[in-house]
Image: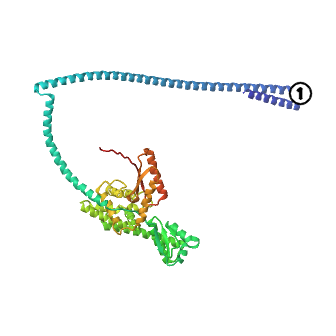
Amino acid sequence: MHIQILLVIVAGISVGVVAGFLLSKKIGAKHLEGAKAQSERLLREALQEAEQTKREKLSEARDEIFKLRQDAEKEIKERRGELQRSERRLEQKEENYDRKLEKISQKEDELRNRESHLEKRFKEVEDLRQEQVSRLEEVAQMSREDARNLLLQEVEQDAQHIIGLRLKELEEKAKREAERKSREIIVTAVQRCAVEHTSDVAVSTVALPSDEMKGRIIGREGRNIRAFESLTGVDLIVDDTPEAVTLSSFDPVRREVARLSLERLIVDGRIHPARIEELVEKAGREVEENIMEAGEEALLETGIKNMNNEMVRILGSLKLRYSYGQNALKHSLEVSHVSGIMAAELGLDEDIARRAGLLHDIGKAVDHKIEGPHALIGADIAKRYNETPVVVNAIASHHEDVEQQSVYDVIVAAADAVSASRPGARRESLDAYVRRLEKLEELAKSFNGVSKAYAIQAGREVRVVVASSVTDEGIINKLAWDIARKIEEEMKYPGQIKVTVTKEIRSVEYAK
C-alpha cells in the first residue's frame, strides 16, 4: 500500500517537472512560477488521493479481520456446545449403566433369597410327604412296599389287554410289510445274478472304391481333409489300410454326420471345400431328423407319453451309441420292456418302470461332453426336463452311484444287468477286461501301506485296504488322492473310477 502511494507521488513529481520544464522552455522565465505552483498543486492532490486510498484500504482490512474473528468465535462456540452435549450424553450413559448394575445386584439378591426360601419350602414339603406316607400306612395297615406291589399287579393286568391289542396290530402290519419286502428281496436277487461291463466305440470305417480316392480326399496341400475335419469336428485318418479310411471321434452324432458326408462325397466325386460344406450341412440335418424319428419310435414302442422334445432327441441319439457292440438305444428298449414285465409281476406301476428303464442310460448320449458317471449325468438331464423323482433316482442309482430308495431303482438295475449279460448281447474281450482289472489292483497295491486292493463294479471302483499300522487320517486321504492321480496318468478307461481307501482293524481273542 505504501509502495502505491510512493509511486503516485513520484509520478506526480515527474509530471510536474516535465510540465514545468516544457513551460519554462516555451514561455520562458515569465511563467516559471506558475508551473511550479501547478506542480505543487498536483503534488498535493496526489498526496491527498494516496492518503484517502490508504484510509480506505485500512478500513477494508479492519472489516475483514473483524468478520474472520466473528466466524472463528462462532465456530469455537458451536464446537464447545457439541462437546458439552457429548459430555452430557456420556454422563447419561454412565448413569444408565449404574442404574442397570444396581438393578442386577438387586435381582441377584432377590434370587438368592428366593432360592433359600424354596429350599426351605422343599424341605417342609418333603417332611409333610413323609408324614402323610406314615399316616397312610397306619390307616391302610399296609406297608409302602405292599402298596406298590398291589398297584403293579393291577397295572400289569390292564397292560396285558393293551399288549394283546398292540401285538395283533403289529402282526397285521408285519404281514403288509412282508409282501413289500419280499418284492425287494426277489428283484435284488435277480440283480445280483447279472454282471455289467462298459465300453465305447469311437471310430467308423468308410470303404473307398480305390486307393486313388485317398489322394482326392486329402486334396491339394491337404485343403480338402482340413476343410472336412474343421466342418465335422472329426479326425479323418488316411493310412495304409487298403481301400478304407477311418473316422475318429468320441461324439457319435458328429461321427455319423462325417460318415454320411464322406460316403456321399465319394459317390458324387466332386470333392472340394465348397461341396464338402454343402454335404456336411445336409447330412447334419438328416442325422437330426433320424435322431428325432428314432426317439419317437422308441416312445411308441414302449407306450410312453408326455416327454420333452429335447429328451426325445437325446434318447434318439443313443441309436448312434454302442457299448461292446451293443446298441445303446436297443439296450434301453430291452431294459424298458424287462422293467415293465418285472413291475407287472410284482403288482407295481408298469408305466413308471418302463419310463425309468428307457431313460436309464440317457446320460451316455452326452457323457463325452460332461465329466462324471453317465448315471448321474442322466439323472441331472431327467431332473432338468421335469421327470418325476422316482424316475430320476432310478436313473442315478442303476449303477449304485447313489443309494437306491425305491423298488423301481432295484428293478431298473436288475433289468439293465439282464439285458447286458444275456448271451450274444455284447461283444467283449474277456482277456482285455481281466487285464484292466488286474492292472488297476496292481497299481493300487504299489503304494506303501496298502495291504489289499480289489477292483469292483466292473472296474468303476477300486477298494483299497491299508494296514492297521497307518493311523494318521491325513495319510489315508493323501493315499486316495495319489492313487486316483496315478490311475489318471497310467490307465485309459471310460467314465471315471472311484477310489475308496479303508483302514483294516483286527481284534483277536481266544476262549479258553
Image check: 418 left or right of 235? left
In this view, 223 is above or below 449: below
Local crowd size for mark 1, using a 10 Å CA cut-off: few (<14), some (14–19), many (≥20): few
Q: Nearer the viewer, residue 454 or 38?
A: 454
In this view, 51 is above or below 281: above
Task: List the residue tagged with mark 1.
Answer: 29
Q: Position of residue 365 (x, y in %)?
A: 41, 63
Please tell me which residue is depicted at 27% across the width and 62% down the height of the picture. Answer: 342
In this view, 157 is above or below 186: above
Q: Nearer the viewer, residue 207 or 47?
A: 207
Please tell me which residue is depicted at 48% across the width and 55% down the height of the picture. Answer: 486
Q: Residue furthest bottom?
A: 209
Q: Nearer the viewer, residue 379 or 491?
A: 491
The reply to whether residue 139 is visible in this rendering is yes
Q: Position of residue 187 (x, y in %)?
A: 28, 59
Q: Position of residue 495 (x, y in %)?
A: 43, 59
Q: Residue furthest front?
A: 512
Q: Secondary structure at mark 1?
A: helix
Q: Position of residue 360 (x, y in %)?
A: 35, 61
Q: Quadrant of the C terminus?
A: top left
Q: Quadrant of residue 71?
A: top right
Image check: 138 left or right of 486? left
In this view, 22 is above or below 340: above
Image check: 139 left or right of 267? left
Q: Quadrant of residue 196?
A: bottom left
Q: Quadrant of the N terminus?
A: top right
The reply to whether residue 367 is visible in this rendering is no
Q: Which amino acid is tagged 1?
A: Ala
Q: Quadrant of residue 72?
A: top right
